[in-house]
Image: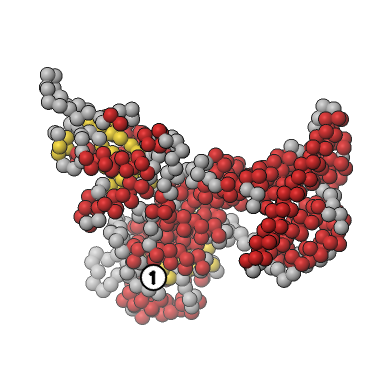
Amino acid sequence: MARAFIIRPFGTKNDINFDDVQKTLIAPALAACDIQGGTTEPFLEAGNIRTDMFQQLLVADIVIADISIHNANVFYELGIRHSLQPQRTFLLRAKSKKAPGDRRPQDEVPFDLRTDRYLEYDSDSPAEKLELMIEALRQTLASEKPDSPVFQMLPDLEAQDRSRFLPVPQSFRDDVELAAKRRQMGLLGLLAIEAEQFFWASEGLRLVARAQFDLKFYRAAKDTWEKLYKLNPNEPETNERLGTIYQRLGDLDSSDQALQRVINSKTASHADRAESFSLLGRNIKERWRSSWISVAADQAQRKALQSPLLLQAYEKYNQGFLENLDSFYPGLNALSLLTLAIELAKQLPDAWETRFETESQARSELDALQIQRQRLAGAVGVSLEVARQRLLESGKEDRWVNISLADFLFLTTDRPQRVAFAYESALAGAPAFYSDSARAQLDLFRQLSVLVDSANKALEVFAPPAPAKETPQPPARVILFTGHMIDPPGTSPSRFPDSIRDKARQAILDRVQQELKRTEGKVVAIASAASGGDLLFHDVCEQLGIEHRLLLPLAPDPFRNESVSPAGRFWEDQFDRLLRKFPAPPYLSNSDDLPIWLSMKTDYSTWQRSNLWLLQEALAAEGKNLTLIALWDGVKTEGIGGTYHMRAIAQECGAALVTIYTADLLSA
């Protein structure tokens, strides 16, 4: 969600009610564009207006400035924004209200702003321009052109990096770190949702997104990085990570687009660009390999050589290496692909010649490629030697450097025994994934019958490949349950009295069986364990042999005290029986108190937070379908974190809703 900062006069000045303009024009336009934000008023009340105001002028995704009158604060703050950020500053101004013949001076647009575009509104009816302002705000957010006259006149001026000025609370950082260590994907999703509500949202989201990426939770990471992309479409890290994520999820076209945005970015470093060229090369290499891998062995060589993707992939890797000669990885990949192209051309001269009009052109091009290979091999060798020397000086170890040195020998020497020794030394005692990576490179050459002697000799020193692990398949359906607790004694009108628990259990059983019948494949169920619907749901899942997972808003003992024991001994026994099956269930908090970094958030409770967490855990299971079964009295209770709240947020996420109305059970 984008965040705005509004610069404007307050109250009524020059017959313009600026508070009314805020209420009827600015605020509705922001809401329509899903933009949060406000003015300096909250900072004024807190007494730290200057620090917070400067910070907001720098970090806000969009600044809206009303320049209707000559207000010193407005122009001062607008000047600061124009000097700090090149784009996304939106101006508006009231129309002149001077009557014909009125000689009183009218506040004119200052000279330095006269060339700037702004939205003009009628101060007597500002809402008339609402639709126009909504569209203008959307265009401003989407635009990549500078609207700051400072940056327009000084094109070499660099914008400030907003991330340096967005202090993420240490307690939030700690929560993200702990969730990552415990591999709690649903909790990371919850933290991302909650971070969006704060002015440091972008950097909070970045922490979560990095954790999801490092844990290889690619679908969740995709959603979080895409939120960051919406906030800043040109930011190099965001696009680079998205480029990798899309590739891992099989969407190479989207990956290409994201990586090209890094290359086109004016703020990308040489290292960023080198990495993006390399990742683009990987995408092309993957397409190239797919073009021949399923072809019969005697045709694979010809198909691989004739594909234009082979040399295209080489070119991208080579561009990455030239962008940053310290990065030997793209250079080594470029050398590998160029070697394949040259050796295949030598083995299949007729296939190579079909690419050219004459044989002499074919020979000339092959000669040119061999010269390029000699130069490239020299440069890659130096880059690898520098990397090796730096490791020696630092006393550190990096197996990838040693493996890359072995890869380099494989590509540049005709001594198979020496190549084998280099790999044996590099892989001694290394975990299996190092061997898997090196083996894949050698297998590629063997599949195409290039440098076969060296490849075979090297593979002799490799440990046998580990049996392929069966990849766990996501469930066909996730069933999330929410429902009322048993009524306390004397509740009137009754919502869920203990007297109808058997009817409720049967109704839950019927609905779960209905979901099983319409699902082909594995079903996973998720619920908390409050008295009433939750515990009945777990009991039904146990009866049906469904995998069910227990998640608690609070630690087991305080949760038992608050959400189970008031309903009586029967429910305590049910809860204790469930805990014997799940002796250490994940829980959200030790108490009802919100984390310190959330304590300033109004109208928010641990129970609302728990609902969001349960839903994020259900989504994190990555089921093909998601169903919410709700045992509900039909009463809409906004914002308290109960059954209605869960139904609302689950529906927003596209879950199928199955509702059991307690009124029907009471009347049956």
Left or right placement of residue 656 versus residue 17 in this view: right
Q: In the rendered image, which quarter is residue 519 located in?
A: bottom right
**In which quadrant will I find the C terminus?**
bottom left
Q: In front: 149, or 36?
A: 149
Q: x%, y% of residue 529?
A: 41, 71
Left or right placement of residue 525 versus residue 108 in this view: right
Left or right placement of residue 102 versus residue 494 in this view: left
Res. 198 visible in picture = yes
Residue at the spot x=35%, y=55% of the render?
198
Colour basis: secondary structure
Q: In front: 350, or 539?
A: 350
Mark 1 neighbour class, 10 Å CA radius: few under 14, some 14 to 19, many 20 or more: some
Q: x%, y% of residue 124?
A: 18, 31
Q: Is residue 239 above or below residue 203?
A: above
Residue indicated by mark 1? 589
Residue at the spot x=72%, y=51% of the render?
380
Q: In front: 186, or 317?
A: 317
For the residue labelled by badge 1, is the local secondary structure a helix, a strand or a loop?
strand
Residue at the spot x=29%, y=54% of the render?
51
Res. 242 visible in picture = no
Amino acid at dot 1: Ser
Q: In front: 506, or 329?
A: 329
Left or right placement of residue 309 versus residue 352 in this view: left
Q: x%, y% of residue 647?
A: 38, 56
Q: In the rendered image, which quarter is residue 6 located in?
A: top left
